[in-house]
Amino acid sequence: MRKDFFLLLLIIFCSISLSAVVNFSFVGDVMFPKSILEMFKTPSGYDFKPIFSEVKDIISSSDIAFCNLETTLGGPPYTGVPKFSSPDEVLEAIHWAGFDVVNVSNNHMLDTGTNGLRRTIQQVRNYGFTSVGGRLSPDEPRYSIVEVNGVKISFAGFTFSTNGIPIQREYAYMFDYINDHVVLSTVKQMRQNSDIVVVHFHFGVEFMRNPTKEQERIAKLCIENGADIVVGSHPHVLQRVDVVNYNGKKKVIAYSLGNFVSNMLEPYTDVGVILNVSYDTEQGAIVVNPIITWRHRFSKNGKNSLRIIPVLDFVKKPDKFITKTDLEALKKILENTKLLKN
C-alpha cells in the first residue's frame, strides 16, 4: 500500500507543469538626432531622462525590457543624420527608464566605424545592459543569454544593411547581416541552450506600414526553427503583430515596432508601441498587450521639449501640456492603430 502511495505521488509530481512566465516589454528605434540633443543639453552635459518620464513605470515593471539603439556612442563630436554619434548620457536615460537589453545591430551601427561600434558595445555593457547584435571578439557567441527566475532567455540581432559602409574582413565577426544559414544555425543553437528564444531583425522598407514578403518569410522561418518571439525595426512606422500557433505554443511576430524615440517628421513616425508580452515556457504567449505611444513635442518654460507618452492614458487624463490639438491627434491615433492579428 505504501509503495503504491509513493508511486501515485510520483505520477502526480511528474504531471505537474514546470512552466514559468517571463514578462517582456519591447520597443522599437531609439534615436537621438541633433534636434533632441539641443533640447536636452545642460551646462554639464545632457539629461535625456525627461523623455522617458511618462513611460518609465511601464517599462521598469517588466522582467525584461528591450530596445533598439539606433545610434553609435562613438564619442564627440556628437552628430545626427546621416551618421549618428550620441553622448553616453543616452545610456543613463535608457537605464533610468528601466531597459535591460539593448540591440546595436542596425543600419547605423557602423556610422562611426569599427572603433565606434566597439566603443558602443563596451559602453552598453559598462552601463549594465545585455548587449545584442554586436561582438567584441570572434570567441563570443552570436547570441546573449539572460536568466530571469531560473528561465534562460536568449537574444540575437541581425541587420539587412549598414548603409553601404563596409566592414574590413578582420572585423567581420563583430555583427551579422541577415543570412538564412547564419540566422537558422544561430536560432537552433539558441533553442538548445535556452528556454525562450528572441530574435531581432532590422529589416523592411522605411515608412511602409505593411511588412514585405521577405520580412514575413524570414520571420516565419525563425518561428519554424525554434524562435519564440521575433521583433523587427527599421521602417520607423508600426507594422502588424501576429500571434501564431506552432507546435502547441503561441508565438509572436512583431514586424516593426516603429519609432520609440525620434523627431522624424514623416507621416506615422511619431507613433510607437511598448509591446508587452507575457510568455509561458510551456504555453507560449499568454498575454500580448501593445501599449501605443506618441512622441509629444511641447513647450516647457519657454523651451522646446519632447516626451514619450502612452496614448490611451493621456486621452483619459490629459495633463496641462496636452493642447486641444494634441488631444484630437491622440484620439485619432487610437482610432487608426490596430496592431494585433491573431
Image (spheres, rainbow, N blue to C red):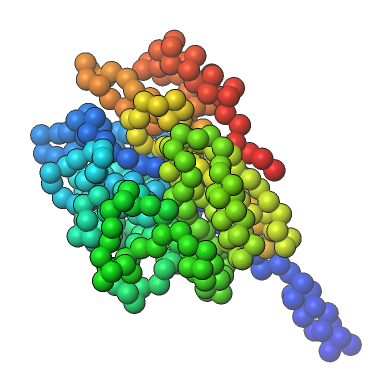
Q: Residue furthest right?
A: 1
From the viewer's side, name the closer residue of 10 and 285: 285
Query: Residue 40 at x, y = what percent?
Result: 22, 32
Q: Residue at x 61, y 31 (%)?
A: 338
Q: Is residue 127 visible?
A: no
User: Residue 204, relative to residue 105: is it above or below?
Assistant: above
Q: Position of residue 114 (x, y in %)?
A: 23, 60
Q: On the rendered structure, is 41 left or right of 194?
A: left
Q: Which residue is rendered at x = 41% and y = 54% of the image?
A: 159
Q: Position of residue 335 (x, y in %)?
A: 59, 22
Which residue is more in the foreground, 132 or 219? 219
Name the quadrant of the N terminus: bottom right
Q: Quadrant of residue 284?
A: bottom right
Q: Position of residue 274 (x, y in %)?
A: 49, 40
Residue 336 lies left or right of residue 148; in this view the side is right
- On screen, residue 79 versus residue 252, left or right, reads left
Residue 315 lies, with reference to residue 96, above or below; the image says above
Tally the numbered discs: 0
Quarter of the C terminus within the rendering: top right
From this view, report whether residue 296 is shown above or below residue 282: above
Residue lying at 21% horizontally and 46% vertically, measured from the top left = 85
For image coordinates 73% across by 69% down, the residue present is 16
> Which residue lies most toward the left here?
43
